[in-house]
Image (cartoon, grey):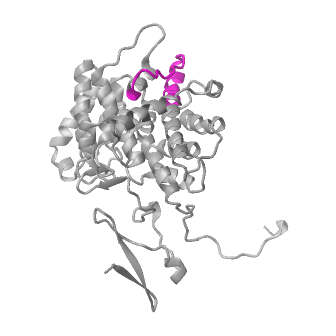
Amino acid sequence: MSKTATIAIDDKKIELPVIVGTENEVAIDIEKLRALTGVITLDPGYKNSGSCKSAITFLDGEEGILRYRGYAIEDLAEKSNFLEVAYLTIFGELPTTEEIQKFENDIRKHTLVNEEMKGIIDGFPKHAHPMGVLASLTCALTAFNPSVVNVENADQMYDAVCKIMGKFLVVATWTYRKTKGYPLNYYDNTKPYVDNFLRLMFELPTEPYKVNPVVLNAIDKLFILHADHEQNCSTSTVRMVGSSHAGLFASISAGVSALWGPLHGGANQAVLEMLEEIQNDGGDADKYLAKAKDKNDPFRLMGFGHRVYKNFDPRARIIKKAADEVLKELGVNDPILKIAKDLEEMALKDEYFVARNLYPNVDFYSGIIYRALGIPTEMFTVMFAIGRLPGWVAQWKEMRENKEPIGRPRQVYVGEPLRAFKEMKDR
């Protein structure tokens, strides 16, 4: 027998269906609430509202669980690679050897970006924020790929996925090359996807570039850990924009803009800015740990705790090891990174932070890795976007294939009631 929830409004009672997910998540289906009662719900920030049913990602913040398509993030990070996880996230199953080879080869068919895109990137000043440039370039790809994807045609959908996977990586790295004043690199179709990322970013025409396997492993894991994260701000934006039947490139561009915000993808950038603030003030980690515990002090310790995870961020456990390996491999002597390690060690032992589950999160460790690699702070969110691309694509694809209606939230109007118009002379 299916469950129902009873809602009483004045003297009227209605029964609403209760939906139970595969991991026993319970939701009251209020789709017909307004039609039956004339009443809507008010939920600022949608913290208690489910916008869709999704089969992509399961997240349990209380228990520190993250799974893509039923697979534990720990297993995927240890045993898989980013392109396999991208395939899993988008198409629902881990690929066979033949499927992943075909997927990578088909992505390679679309890695060449139209040369006219260089004219667009040349129009930006050198100091333009890479995320603003990336959002613009992603949307501009629509002009060079104007055909509308028929989501009911599996071949067209697959081709669209391969196209954006190929081109987005290239234009994302171009945003870095622009800020450095370097010539723009091209994808090398003889090399794997994440290897290409490192080469696109760092290879110079004056000398050969050799991929460091420790660095490659860390970047691959970071991309996997960021691949999807349920209905966060940028993902919800991609679904919302896509619900109007806007194209894939335009929807992903909107997701990039949403990710740019410091409360979302900009969190790892905020970590480094905080560390630089501590360094400029003498580098005393103890002082800032005390400031973080002082409720009367506005200082916030960035990169500790998480809005969703009330336990240890499962992604942080994985990437902490990779961060330690990168620092050891590169032998980086950076006072900023020393402050980060000091804060980490002290906070993990401090009763105040332990009692409140304020552990270092994935943004803390990703910032450390990017800093060690010499990636500028303003590029951190671009790195996040590259990893999150498969999730955005998967969510857009799922939303369109499920024929979800156009997103149109309601509101409670609190403005002026009807007023008589005043002539200019009476104002």
For the residue pair 425 and 155, the one nearer the viewer reads as: 155
For the residue pair 94 and 271, the one nearer the viewer reads as: 94
Residue that sits furthest to the top in the current view: 206
> Is-magenta flag for residue 175?
yes
For the residue pair 420 and 243, the one nearer the viewer reads as: 243
Percent coordinates x, y for residue 285 in the rendering: 25, 34
Instruction: State the extent of the magenta-drawn residues as a range.
Output: 169-194
Q: Is residue 198 left or right of residue 287?
A: right
Q: In this view, does 410 lie to the left or right of 343?
A: right
Say above or below: 409 vs 225: below
Q: In this view, does 421 lie to the left or right of 244?
A: right
The residue depicted at 33 percent of the width and 41 percent of the height is: 225
For the residue pair 330 and 205, the one nearer the viewer reads as: 205
Location of residue 100 by image quarter: top left
The residue depicted at 52 percent of the width and 44 percent of the height is: 155
Percent coordinates x, y for residue 269 in the rendering: 40, 36
Percent coordinates x, y for residue 14 in the rendering: 44, 85
The residue depicted at 46 percent of the width and 20 percent of the height is: 188
Quadrant where the N terminus lies? bottom left
Instruction: Mark yes or no: residue 287 visible.
Output: no
Q: In this view, does 226 lie to the left or right of 129?
A: left
Say above or below: 349 vs 34: above
> Is-magenta flag for residue 105?
no
Percent coordinates x, y for residue 334 in the rendering: 29, 21
